[in-house]
Amino acid sequence: MISARVPRGFYAFLGIIALWALLVAVPARAQTPAEADNPFHGQNITLIISFASGGPVDGVARVLGGTLSDNLPGHPKIIYMNIPGADGVAALNRLYTITKPDGLTFLIGAGNQLNPVNLKREQVKYDPTKLNLIGGFANPSSYFLVRSKAVDRLTDHTAAPVQLAAIDGTRSGEQMGVWLAHAFNWNLKMVVGYAGNATQVLAMQQGEVDMLSTNDVEVVKTSTASGEGALIAQTGMLRNGKLVPSSVFQTAPILTDLIAKKLQGKALAAFTFWNRFRQIGMWLALPPHTPDSYVSLYRKAFSKAVADPDLRRLIARYNPDPSALSVEDLAALIREMTNTPDELVAYVDELTKSYR
């Protein structure tokens, strides 16, 4: 009988092979029905906030995030990531070009990221028409106030100009005065350099300026109740594709109804573009190519969240008349912004400069 010497370690090797075979033979644990229907099971979700902490977009994001989590299956934890820079462009560039479309990252932005002026900037790397929109909020109505003592000077070009308080002249509320002045041939001069709405309000109360635009309903109520200010117009809010008065000042005329019939040609086209743009408030989106199943879950969660009266009460700190903007309305506005001709953007810019 011939016997061969067994190599050292041979039996250990056989043991490893046997263990491997046993592991292969044991099937992986199947997902439970609950887990199969819940892609967020055990997951964290990142919410990119397009602006610095402490501002209104940051405030709404942190209020909204918790309610969204409550309405997503599995109630995933929300991780907040502020990416300020370039007026919101930095954050949206990241979502569009780097973020994996796995349904675990979404973004909250604001209207200025969709401004045709910004969309033409070289550093913009995103096409907003390709985002997977979740929903948003209509921009709150702006109100245009004039000191009662200055109303007679509006059409008297021999008197001192009626002064409009402005931050830089480009804000949509400030440009309400520009369009009113253009349509009614007002004797108006824009005074730029104010730090914010609070300083504008104080300047008007002290008689330093004669008019301002604000979305602070308490300022409007106080000014009109005292008789010191007259509410000339409001921009209104977009609901179901139509402009309607705010729920707070339903009788104040909508700017479009006041001046659209007085404008023609390029002026009317430019005003229409500007008026549509200012309806865009805060909005939420997922990266391009995110699976439809995830997009649907986010949209359902957002619809439930914005119907929550507690959430609406908290958001009212940042938006006094919160109104949901549907995906359809938001998508239509974005298409319009991306297709706005350069000449209309230039027209608004030149018109604004003529009153400075």
Image: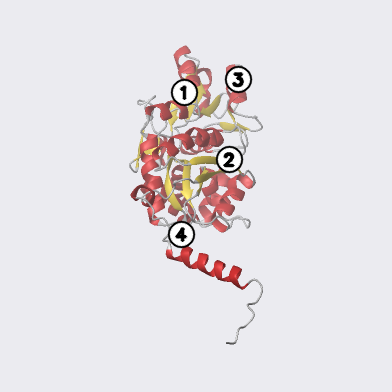
Which quadrant would residue 243 be assigned to in this image?
top left
Label 2: element kind: loop
Q: Please report whichever mark, 2 or 3, sits nearer to the chain's N-terminal start.
A: 2
Direction from residue 258 to residue 86 in the image, left or right: right
Q: Which colour scheme is used?
A: secondary structure
Disc assigned to residue 289: 4
Disc assigned to residue 170: 2
Q: How far apart are marks 2 and 1 (CA)?
A: 22 Å
Which quadrant would residue 55 be assigned to in this image?
top right
**The residue under label 3 is which amino acid type?**
Leu
Q: Which of marks 4 and 2 is in front?
A: 4
Residue carrying label 3: 202
Residue located at (49% from left, 32% from top): 63
Q: How far apart are marks 3 and 4 (CA)?
A: 49 Å
Q: Nearer the viewer, mark 2 or mark 1?
A: 1
Disc assigned to residue 217: 1
Marks 4,2: beta carbons within 8 A: no
Q: Distance between the residues labelled 2 and 3?
A: 20 Å
Marks 2,3: beta carbons within 8 A: no
State the image coordinates of residue 185 (x, y, percent, origin top left): 49, 35
Q: Please report whichever mark, 4 or 1, sits nearer to the chain's N-terminal start.
A: 1
Q: Please report whichever mark, 1 or 3, sits nearer to the chain's N-terminal start.
A: 3
**The residue under label 1 is which amino acid type?**
Val
Q: Nearer the viewer, mark 3 or mark 4?
A: 4
Looking at the image, the residue that sits furthest to the front is 1
Query: Could you tell me which quadrant the C terminus lies in?
Result: top right
Q: Please report whichever mark, 2 or 1, sits nearer to the chain's N-terminal start.
A: 2
**The residue under label 2 is which amino acid type?**
Thr
State the image coordinates of residue 6 (x, y, percent, origin top left): 63, 77
Q: Distance between the residues labelled 4 and 2?
A: 34 Å
